[in-house]
Amino acid sequence: MTLAEDKVRETLKQVIDPELYINIVDLGLVYLVDVLEPNEDGRHDVRIEMTLTSPMCPAGPQLVAGAKNAAESLEEVDKAEVQVVMDPPWSQEMMTEEARDQLGIF
């Protein structure tokens, strides 16, 4: 039961920023998804580093909890640790082309 980073990232797309209505992956908020070696039961711990659009983002706690819950919803995941990092600072260039289109940023 191997878990790929791509599967975790795809699951994290369920977490939608409540102000921008775009998922945290396409917004470029997820910097790192580290799938650790399987535990004795074959399940993985996952380490996620993400940022926020601003240090005072009011949706921050909701987004962090959403990322943790989404990752832990995968049957291959035992537990997920989500760490908020502010370096490098988030910028619009980190967004996918689709996210920029949705927001009308060219």
Image (spheres, grey):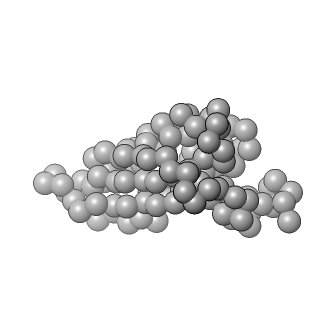
Left or right relative to 106: residue 71: left
Residue at 55% in and 51% down: 86
Relative to 14, say whether 61 is above or below. Answer: above
- Can residue 75 be seen here? The reply is no
Q: Quadrant of the C terminus?
A: bottom right
Task: Provide residue 69's location: percent of width, then percent of height.
Answer: 44, 40
Residue lying furthest left in this view?
40
Residue at 42% in and 64% down: 5
Pick the front one: 106 or 41: 106
Left or right relative to 99: residue 64: left
Left or right relative to 45: residue 102: right
Left or right relative to 31: residue 100: right
Name which quarter of the figure residue 56 lies in. Answer: top right
Task: Provide residue 49's location: percent of width, then percent of height.
Answer: 46, 54
Relative to 93, say whether 22 is above or below. Answer: above
Residue at 86% in and 57% down: 104
Q: Quadrant of the N terminus?
A: bottom left
Task: Provide residue 101's location: percent of width, then percent of height.
Answer: 81, 61
Pick the front one: 78 or 92: 92
Residue at 52% in and 60% down: 31
